[in-house]
Amino acid sequence: MSLLVAGSLHLDVVLCAPYLPGLDETVSGSSVNYVFGGKGGNQAISAARMGANVHFAGRAGSDHFGDMIRETLTASGVEVSQLQRDIGPSGMSTAIVDANGEYGAVIVSAANLNIVANDIIMPQGTSLVILQNEIPQEVNLTLAQKAKAAGSEVWLNAAPARELPKRLAEAVDLLIVNRVEAEFYANSRPTKNVLTTLGERGVYYNGVQYAGFPVDVVSTHGAGDMFVGTLAGQVVRGQTMVDAIRFAQAAAALHVSCQVEQRKDLGPQSVKAFLADQDSL
């Protein structure tokens, strides 16, 4: 069985600084990295690197950033036949990471806003489709309905938080949110099946809180996408939800404890070794 990730693609410009600047403040940084990003792209690569069969649907620009995005997806083992090409710029973001590993970011969606949902076909054997809120609402709705018609499960990582139309909420089998997004949906609870990520406190799902793994944090940038992509990939590969949550938590723990340039080397063997170490403690 395979996973279809449909969502955003960005080229992230990641700046390291001692702290996040305040209003009208300029802070001297220490380094800059150009990092593949966008919630959709990050989740697709996370799932593929952890062994899942992953297809991606989305849109990148005709600029140099678009070339880098396409090359990164392909090199990571993601199937990209449904990656559309826009005549304009690719999406991008700028993130500032402070000395404690926390960050703030600004995104410019660009090509991501021009995805043509009607051109996207559900790949044969797709058992799960992941969506996020960094692409237009109508695209998510169209793809969710296509997924349900094909018999696929639909997960929505509702980030950033926004109101969900009833038809989309009804098509979602699992809503994945972080603490901030959970507060946004607290009164409406658009779907009954919700998984909430709690940072260092772990994950809350189906009435149970699963404790996280304590690690020394280098940067939390992209940790949520590592968790979501790995979780989906493991479920598609046949793991139970409980086992997949633990595996995804371990992957996210390794992610936040690695330097940015080391993260591309994380794979299932790294996670299994980490879990074995945890079990021996």
Image (cartoon, helix red, strand yellow):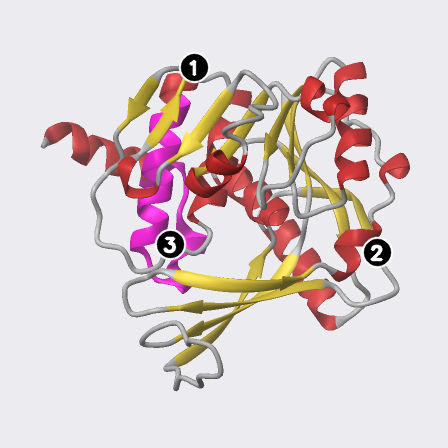
- Split into 4 quadrants, where in the image is the C terminus? top left
- What label sits on residue 85 in the rendered view? 2
Q: Are marks 1 and 3 in contact (CB under 8 Å)?
A: no
Q: CB atoms at circles 1 and 2 under 8 Å apart?
A: no
User: First in sequence: mark 1 or mark 3?
Assistant: 3
Does dot 2 land on a helix, a strand or a loop? strand
First in sequence, mark 1 or 2: give its number: 2
- Foreground residue among 177 and 244: 177
Which quarter shows the N terminus? top right
**Can you identify the residue that label 3 sits on?**
220
Give the residue at mark 1. Answer: 240
Circle 1 sits in a helix, a strand or a loop, which is it? loop
Which three-letter amino acid code belongs to the residue tagged 3? Thr
- Residue located 46% across and 52% down the image: 222
Prevailing SS of the magenta stretch: helix
Residue 103 picture location, percent across and down: 41, 62
Amino acid under label 2?
Arg
Start-end of magenta stretch: 244-270
Identify whether 126 is placed above or below 227.
above
- What's the residue type where badge 1 is placed? Thr
CA gap between label 2 and label 3 equals 30 Å
User: Badge 2 local density, few (<14 within 10 Å), some, or many (20+)?
Assistant: many
